[in-house]
């Protein structure tokens, strides 16, 4: 789960990581109020999950509350790389002396968290990595030990950070680690980590991702799950307890098992179709789940739907019942191809006989049929 | 023959009295798996499905020293602890079915596994089956039959689809291993391939991977250098978009890492044909078996 910069900074602040004074706002009036409270120059920053906000016009400095109100009026509601800005962060502007990069990320290959530090802050870290890999100092954290002080020293001195601020930077890094661990983060990036003109070490920006599997024990963070412009249907699916990913195509996909569903997407793609979504109903799904699934998929307004079931624990007759229930309530006008194999396949197929649902015996046949029928009017 | 489990497997079920644990214990018993004991804290001294229950894993083993494997049906908040308990009791094979174990928990479990006596399979896996002998987990036993093809996969139902097609065409399996869909798993493709390579009864191996991570690439490197029997590959998620998690916690293309293209390329380079469809997997297996036939 991604969280916004203002939320990440709240997480940091709770643990004592130094962050600029600021507050989130959703209206120009609030922005002006906050700017007035902060006093002096403020920066208004769009809160959307994209990189390069500054270049896209989503970050603006203001010298007065009136100016802040005006720039926020432009930023709020703007389209930033496909996302609509609904919130901004209003922060005290900081006098930057030095900018570093600090990142804590789960390294899948190493199966550990890696800590990365570079003198080259305030720019794309991937570019730095490509141009000069030695510019990034790394340390992998042993879960039996946690982040060791010597590792922090290794990084600060290897990366060539300011020797005059070793103590403050060490404190910052250790506190960031604390925030990372206590919030079940999978990524925490401070870019730039700023040394201000009066010697403070502070997080000018912060990007954090939280482990979805840990949200059950991160109730405060879980409350921040929110809808983005293109995934209102994903939110709906999540509220119904469905594993769902919105995609760009026009053929709805429902299946049981993530690997099977991914393969179904591929099968449709091979036939020249484009999947509208990924939806895994999981194992042993009852009719009600299947009905829910079809309802959600229809929200994508697909030209056709493919339901691909290989039932182990999942019963094909339960699936058929759910599909029929949904069709009975929804008046679906597009072709629905249903492939039922495995447990209770005979019973399931029998239930679909004589209905408008189109049967298929194999995944390949189902993919071919749904693409042909969905695009038949072309 | 087989890998990891056989007729000598003696199984402990952690979380046996839960809904999943209960249902699948019955299914495993029906398959013929020797289920010796169950653990549900607080229910020690009672019985469930004909199996004696204990409060702790250590107590279960002390009373039943023949136990050589455990399966874990415990909800996500407690699953890592159940794994650690089994590792501490030195159970040689632990299979964790649970989906949704927090990443930080698995980082710690992975650390403890190193140097331990335990092989962990999973989490977030359907388990493994040796047809005719033993089934640990939730796979539908009736689709398999004993034979000479080994299957290893990150998926559940996709694996069943692949196995069912082989069985329908008269080709049986030595063992079917579901390694799971999480980013940190106890047993990776390379571990299973090594085992199949050393199993005299396995003549061809089917390896079904998907986007995310680099397990398939690591396995491909092993196949290229060491595998003495043919491998047929499959990669799911070829049309998945970048940056989106496709159901499995580990099925995600991050930046440029973990793409289907890279996996297909690595396997192809290792001499492993990668089927375009699940139906084609069976065709490739049949072809490979035929090529092996003259040597007999």
Image (tube, grey):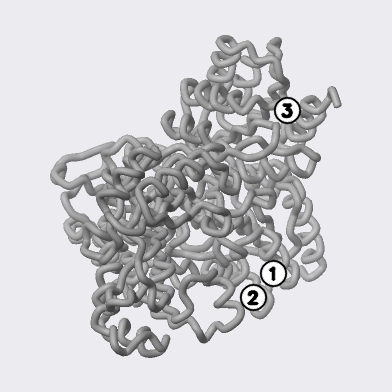
Q: Are marks 1 and 2 in contact (CB under 8 Å)?
A: yes
Q: Secondary structure at mark 3?
A: strand
Per the image, the residue denoted by label 3 is A360
Q: Residue at x 55, y 22 (%)?
A: A295
Mark 3 or 1: in front is: 1
In the displayed structure, would residue B232 be above or below residue A122?
above
Q: Circle 2 is placed at which residue position?
A: B221
Residue A228 placement (x, y as % from top left): 49, 39
What residue is drawn where x is 60% and y is 44%?
A: A82
| Mark-to-mark CA distance, 3 and 1 | 34 Å
Which sits in the foreground, B155 or A123? A123
Element assignment for label 2: helix
Q: Which residue is mark 1?
A: B266
Label 3 chain ID: A
The structure residue drawn at horizontal position 28% and vertical position 49%, both measured from the top left corner, is A36
- The foreground one among A266 and A155 is A155
Given the image, what chain letter belongs to the residue carrying mark 2? B
Residue B5 versus residue A302 in the image, above or below: below
State left or right for residue B41 relative to residue B71: left
């Amino acid at each position: 789960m991604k969280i916004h910069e203002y939320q990440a900074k709240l997480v940091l602040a709770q643990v004592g990581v130094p962050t600029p004074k600021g507050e989130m706002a959703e209206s120009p009036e609030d922005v002006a109020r906050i700017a007035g409270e902060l006093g002096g120059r403020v920066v208004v920053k769009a809160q959307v999950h994209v990189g390069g906000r500054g270049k896209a016009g989503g970050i603006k400095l203001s010298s007065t509350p009136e100016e802040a109100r005006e720039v926020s009026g432009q930023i709020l509601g703007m389209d930033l790389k496909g996302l609509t800005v609904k919130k901004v962060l209003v922060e005290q502007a900081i006098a930057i002396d030095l900018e570093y990069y600090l990142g804590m990320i789960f390294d899948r290959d190493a199966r550990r968290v890696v800590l990365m530090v570079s003198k080259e802050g305030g720019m794309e870290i991937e570019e730095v990595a490509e141009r000069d890999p030695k510019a990034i100092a790394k340390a992998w954290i042993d879960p039996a030990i946690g982040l060791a002080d010597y590792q922090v020293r290794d990084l600060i001195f290897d990366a060539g950070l300011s020797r005059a601020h070793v103590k403050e930077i060490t404190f910052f890094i250790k506190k960031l680690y604390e925030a990372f661990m206590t919030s079940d983060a999978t990524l925490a990036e401070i870019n730039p980590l700023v040394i201000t003109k009066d010697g403070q070490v502070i997080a000018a920006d912060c990007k954090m991702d939280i482990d979805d599997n840990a949200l059950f024990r991160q109730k405060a963070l879980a409350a921040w799950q929110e809808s983005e412009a293109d995934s209102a249907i994903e939110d709906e699916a999540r509220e119904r307890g469905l594993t769902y990913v919105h995609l760009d195509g026009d053929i709805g996909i429902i299946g049981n098992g993530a690997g099977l569903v991914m393969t179904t997407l591929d099968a449709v793609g091979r036939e020249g179709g484009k999947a509208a979504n990924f939806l895994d109903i999981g194992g042993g799904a009852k009719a009600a789940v299947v009905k829910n699934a079809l309802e959600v998929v229809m929200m994508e307004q697909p030209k056709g739907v493919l339901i691909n079931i290989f039932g182990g624990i999942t019963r094909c007759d339960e699936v058929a019942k759910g599909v029929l229930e949904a069709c009975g309530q929804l008046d679906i006008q597009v072709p629905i191809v249903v492939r039922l194999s495995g447990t209770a396949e005979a019973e399931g197929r029998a239930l679909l006989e004589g209905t408008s649902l189109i049967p298929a015996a194999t995944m390949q046949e189902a993919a071919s049929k749904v693409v042909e029928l969905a695009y038949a009017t072309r | 023959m087989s890998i990891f489990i056989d007729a000598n497997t003696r199984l402990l079920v952690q979380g046996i009295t839960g809904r999943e644990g209960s249902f699948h214990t019955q299914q495993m018993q029906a398959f013929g798996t020797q289920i010796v004991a169950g653990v549900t804290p607080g229910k020690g001294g009672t019985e469930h499905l004909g199996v004696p229950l204990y409060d702790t894993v250590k107590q279960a083993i002390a009373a039943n020293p023949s136990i050589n494997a455990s399966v874990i049906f415990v909800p996500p908040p407690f699953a890592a602890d159940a794994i650690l308990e089994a590792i501490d009791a030195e159970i040689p094979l632990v299979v964790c079915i649970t989906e949704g174990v927090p990443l930080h928990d698995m980082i710690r479990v992975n650390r403890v596994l190193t140097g331990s006596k335990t092989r962990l399979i999973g989490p977030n896996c359907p388990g493994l089956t040796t047809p005719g002998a033993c089934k640990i987990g939730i796979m539908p036993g009736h689709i398999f039959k004993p034979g000479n093809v080994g299957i290893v996969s990150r998926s559940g139902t996709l694996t069943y689809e692949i196995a069912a097609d082989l069985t329908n065409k008269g080709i049986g399996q030595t063992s079917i291993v579901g390694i799971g869909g999480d980013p940190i798993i106890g047993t990776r493709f390379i571990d299973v391939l090594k085992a199949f390579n050393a199993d005299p009864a396995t003549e061809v191996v089917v390896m079904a991977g998907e986007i995310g991570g680099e397990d398939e690439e690591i396995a491909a490197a092993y196949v290229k250098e060491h595998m003495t029997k043919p491998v047929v590959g499959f990669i799911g998620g070829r049309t998945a978009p970048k940056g989106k998690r496709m159901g499995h916690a580990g099925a995600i293309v991050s930046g440029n890492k973990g793409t289907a293209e890279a996996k297909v390329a690595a396997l192809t380079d290792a001499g492993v044909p990668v089927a375009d469809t699940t139906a084609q997997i069976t065709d490739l297996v049949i072809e490979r078996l035929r090529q092996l036939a003259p040597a007999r």
